[in-house]
Amino acid sequence: MPLSDPAPRALSHTRTLELKAYERQDGLWDIEGHITDVKEEDYSMLDSERTADQPVHDMWLRLTIDTDLVVQEAEAQMDIGAHIPCPKAAPNYSRLKGLKMGPGWNKAVRERLGGVMGCTHLNEMLAQMATTAMQSLFEVVENMQDQGDGRYYLSPGLRNSCYAYALNSTYVRDYFPDFYEPDS
């Protein structure tokens, strides 16, 4: 269902974020992200000029992870950064090696790449890359394991992670009764 009809308006900016997951032949997974920002009109920056057909940002990030969701390698590339020095932050993304996706991921990313160590746009994309990884490896990682008797195990990472997986939700009550916690 689309959103309601908007008020009259003119397009100013388009951000495109594309995320893909690849299962590699060596048993690892590549999660790749590509982000672009484009203005609808020519755009002046302190150190450059961009025409409406030139991106303000054109950046790439690849995380290679194992089935435990631990980053084995990380690589960033900035074809176009907002400013001339921006691409110099790309090598810092190797600092993600060894981090595990899951609870605390965003905090760990900020600790290693926050502020002057990283790029705001790539850091924002990392949260979505973790979600993409979890969606891609959902069947590989035992999030919901059939107990063999019609009951399913609900992993700690899914418990209370969103509205549906709230331990007091009707969804958990109906499909994971062993984990259901009714409101008092």
Image (cartoon, helix red, strand yellow):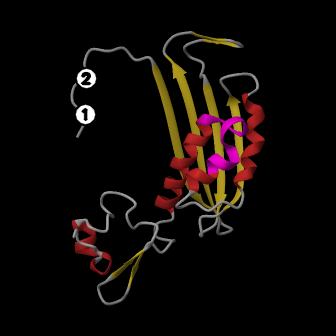
Q: Which residue sits at x=66%, y=49%?
A: 111
The Cα atoms of the two marked residues, 1 and 2, are separated by: 8 Å
Residue placed most toward the observer, 95 or 143: 95
- Camera-side residue: 34 or 46? 46
Query: Is the residue marked by circle 1 packed among few (<14), some (14-19), or many (20+) residues within 10 Å?
Result: few
Which label belongs to residue 93?
Answer: none
Kindly identify the residue that appears in the image at 25 percent across and 65 percent down: 169
Which x, y percent locates residue 129?
Answer: 55, 50
Q: Is residue 60 above or below residue 32?
A: above
Q: Indicate whether residue 67 is drawn in magenta.
A: no
Whether residue 128 is situated above or below residue 143 in the rendered picture: above
- Residue in the picture at 56% in, 51% down: 106
Which amino acid, mark 1? Leu
Say left or right for 60 vs 102. Answer: right
Residue 144 is left or right of residue 62, and the answer is left
Q: On the rendered image, what quadrant is the N terminus found in?
A: top left
What residue sits right under mark 1 in the picture? 3
The C terminus is located in which quarter? bottom left
Q: Is mark 2 on a helix, strand or loop?
A: loop
**Which quadrant would residue 6 be assigned to in this image?**
top left
Which residue was labeled with disc 2?
A: 6
In the displayed structure, does residue 82 sit left or right of residue 148? right
Q: Main secondary structure of the magenta part?
A: helix
**Magenta residues, as a range?**
109-120
The quarter holding residue 3 reads top left
Q: Measured from the top left, where is residue 77 in percent x and y?
A: 71, 38
Whether tag 1 and tag 2 are in contact, CB under 8 A, the answer is yes
Q: Is residue 171 left or right of residue 13?
A: left
Relative depth, front residue between 115 and 173: 115
67 up-or-down from 148: above or below: above
